[in-house]
Image: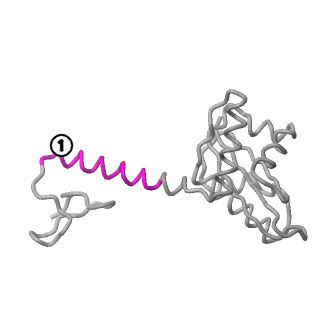
Amino acid sequence: MTGITGICAKFVVRHQPRGGSFCRLPRMLRTKQVLVAFIAVLLVLATASTAAARLRSTDASLLQAMNGARADHGLAPLRIDGRLTWSARSHSADMLRRQYFAHGSFAARIRASGAAGPTFGEDLAWGPASASWVVSAWLASPEHRANLLRPGFGRVGIGAFRGTFSGRAGALVVTADFAGR
């Protein structure tokens, strides 16, 4: 009565008496069961990757501008990392909500997100800005430019929110968290 008898959608179904499980695959060969399990795992991973990669329009515009700058310098594009995105979005939202502009405890935030390194970086921006303005400002600053154009950084999380910041309505507050080697 124990053991795996099949895969149903995104989870494993334990053996149940005949007719007791609507997801049980009847008497499949072991290789077919392994194949079905493998395909189910791929679907779960693809769904998770797609969910992490869903960007709001401002975040997508920033990613496009960032990757355009990297392409202009012969660098590979950045890929969205869900854990870094969580870290970046939470930091931008916190800065907007509490009305401050600082990196704060960057290392602790990254550790809490569970993002893989070993090297991390962070760029911040705020103003009545567009994605191209943000990336241009980062490229004009040696420290921000170093993060954006670091060849070892391959993953990024972007968090951008509009709101009233420092008394200015419609301000864009941006955090970009980078990871790689």
In the rendered image, the vertical position of residue 127 relative to residue 147, given as above or below? below
Q: Residues within 10 Å of mark 1 (few under 14, many from 20)?
A: few
Residue 82: x and y, percent? Answer: 57, 53
Quadrant where the C terminus sits is top right
Residue 105: x and y, percent? Answer: 78, 57
Q: In the picture provided, is 14 more to the left or to the right than 130? A: left
Q: Report the amino acid beneath label 1.
A: Thr
Q: How is the image coloured?
A: one colour
In the rendered image, the vertical position of residue 76 relative to residue 113, given as above or below? above
As helix, strand or loop, the secondary structure at mark 1 comes to: helix
Quadrant where the N terminus sits is bottom left
Q: Residue at x 74, y 44 (%)?
A: 121
In this rendered view, identify the residue nearer to me: 58 or 31: 58
Q: Which residues are magenta?
A: 29-48
In this rendered view, identify the residue nearer to me: 34 or 54: 54
Q: Residue at x 18, y 69 (%)?
A: 22
Q: Outermost residue, top direction?
A: 74
**Image quarter of residue 128:** bottom right
Q: Is residue 43 magenta?
A: yes
Q: In the picture provided, is 100 more to the left or to the right than 83? A: right
Q: Residue at x 76, y 65 (%)?
A: 162
Q: In the picture provided, is 141 more to the left or to the right than 111? A: right
Residue 146: x and y, percent? Answer: 79, 36
Q: Is residue 60 magenta?
A: no
Residue 136: x and y, percent? Answer: 82, 43
* Residue beneath disc 1: 31
Give the number of marks. Answer: 1
Main secondary structure along the magenta-highlighted residues: helix
**Image quarter of residue 27:** bottom left
**Image quarter of residue 20:** bottom left
